[in-house]
Amino acid sequence: MAEPVSIVVMAGLIALFSGGMLALYRFANKRIMEKMLGLKRKNDDLSQVIERLYQARLNDNRETRSRLERLEDKMDALARPRGREKDVALEKVFARARR
C-alpha cells in the first residue's frame, strides 16, 4: 500500500500541475483576446476607410452623370433644325449652365 506521505505529495503535484495549466490557459486566452480586439479595431478602421471611398466615388459618379446629362441637353439643342424651337432650347440650356 502507498504511504500517506506519497499520496499527499502526489495530490500536491497534481494540484500544482493543474494550477499551472489553468494559469497558462488564462494567459493564452488573454493574449488571444487582445489580438482579436486589435483585429476588430483594424477591421472597423478599414470599414470606415472603405465607406469614405464609397461615398467619394458615389459623389463623383453623381457629378459625372449630371455633367453628361447637361452635355446631352446641349447636343439635343444643337441638333435641332434652325428656328424658334432651337433658340428657346439653347436659351434653356445656357440659362441652366449659368446657375
Image (spheres, rainbow, N blue to C red):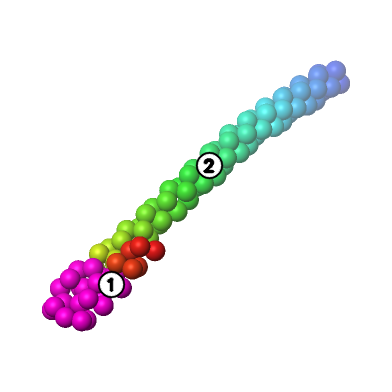
Q: Residue at x 33, y 64 (%)?
A: 97
Q: Nearer the viewer, residue 20 or 68?
A: 68
Give the image quarter of residue 18: top right
Q: Which residue is mark 2?
A: 45
Residue 35 is situated, as x and y percent measured from the top left of the image, at 58, 34
User: Which of the 4 image quadrants contains residue 88?
Assistant: bottom left
Which residue does the image show at 57% across and 40% down from the upper left?
41
Along the viewing direction, whichever of 90 and 3 lies nearer the viewer: 90
Q: Amino acid at mark 1?
A: Glu
Secondary structure type for disc 1? helix
* Residue 85 in the image, given as x and y percentages of width and height: 21, 81
The segment highlighted magenta reads 73-93
Residue 69 versus residue 17 in the image, above or below: below
- In the image, is residue 83 above or below residue 57? below
Q: Is residue 2 visible?
A: no
Among numbered discs 2 and 1, the one appearing first in the sequence: 2
- The local crowd at label 1, few if under 14, some if 14 to 19, many if 20 or more residues have their Cα within 10 Å, is few
Give SS at disc 2.
helix
Q: Given the current orientation, which residue lies at the most extreme bottom position?
A: 84
- In this figure, which residue is indicated by the disc labeled 1? 91
